[in-house]
Image (tube, rainbow, N blue to C red):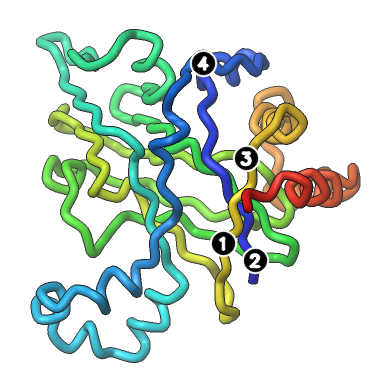
Amino acid sequence: MIIYWSKYINDIASVSKGLKEAPLRGLDLLVTPPQSLYSYLINNNELKEKFGSYSRCTSALNELKKTYFINPDFNYDFYFDENNNLRSDMYDQNMFDNVIQRDAKNLFFINSYFIMFAEKPCTVTQIAPYLHKTSFSRGNCLSVTASLDISKWFRPTHAVYMNDEYTPMQLRTDEPLYYLKFDTDEKIEFKEFTMNDKLLDYALNCTLFKKYSPRKSLNKLYDVFVNRNYHKKVLKEIKQNIVE
């Protein structure tokens, strides 16, 4: 199964306002592709020894073959001040606003700039990075999960963490933000595409749809997407922008 993917830099705050400005520049060369969790375990002798029989368990390995992880493309440190306001001494406010959003008192969205699409039905579940130690797991942050059929909806994925203890949060290029599990028995082939203005418009329409038409089930969203032929439009544009 071919999974089309891209990473693009876009201002979350602008997206939430219905705009498509992209003020961040100079990060494209930092982009890293999805990485296989199966290869991560199998090719690491120290890790295989640590996990013992788990690294040889057929049922476990079958799951790992369907699972990939997404790493941040840059390091970033966040902490809380005495009033529990989120702060950082790295980069500028514009970068801060692009990378992280506080959705509720203890819920945080971290932009991974990752978006994907498939020609055939494929449900993808975002899960916590259970084979990795990260600053989030060390800080007792809880990873929030979600599932989506990426052949019937087109929007970026974000890491979502609950931080009840106000522990510092760190993005590290060698620590996954999250795992993606693909519900398919087919071999997965990733193909990168370049995100252009037309694709960004399609993604924005999906991202903002529930803002203006809330309380719609996923199946209703899928119906709208397919009935408006977005699945054909998105795929056509992606295929015209494949990275060779």
Q: Is residue 77 left or right of residue 195?
A: left
Sooner in the amino-acid sequence: mark 4 or mark 1: 4
Q: Between marks 4 and 1, how big is the CA–CA gap? A: 29 Å
Other-residue count near label 2 (Cα within 10 Å), few / some / many at <14 / 14–19 / ≥20: some
Q: Which residue is mark 1?
A: 190
Whether label 2 touches label 1, CB < 8 Å: yes
Disc number for residue 2: 2
When asked about the image quadrant of residue 194, the answer is top right
Q: Tell me: residue 37, above or below residue 86.
A: below
Residue depth check, mark 3 versus mark 1: number of the one nearer the observer: 1
Q: Between marks 3 and 1, how big is the CA–CA gap? A: 17 Å
Residue depth check, mark 2 versus mark 3: number of the one nearer the observer: 2
Q: Between marks 2 and 3, how big is the CA–CA gap? A: 17 Å
Q: Which residue is mark 3?
A: 155
Residue nearer the viewer, 165 or 45 = 45
Whether label 3 touches label 4, CB < 8 Å: no
Give the residue at x 72% y 35%: 199
Residue 4: x, y in percent?
63, 55
Give the residue at x 68% y 28%: 204
Q: Between marks 2 and 1, how big is the CA–CA gap? A: 6 Å
Residue depth check, mark 4 versus mark 1: number of the one nearer the observer: 1
Q: Is residue 104 left or right of residue 165?
A: right
Q: Amino acid at mark 2?
A: Ile
Sooner in the amino-acid sequence: mark 3 or mark 1: 3
What SS does tag 1 mark? strand
When asked about the image quadrant of residue 52, the answer is bottom left
What SS does tag 4 mark? helix
Whether label 4 touches label 1, CB < 8 Å: no
Q: Which residue is mark 4?
A: 13
Q: Tell me: residue 63, above or below residue 88.
A: below
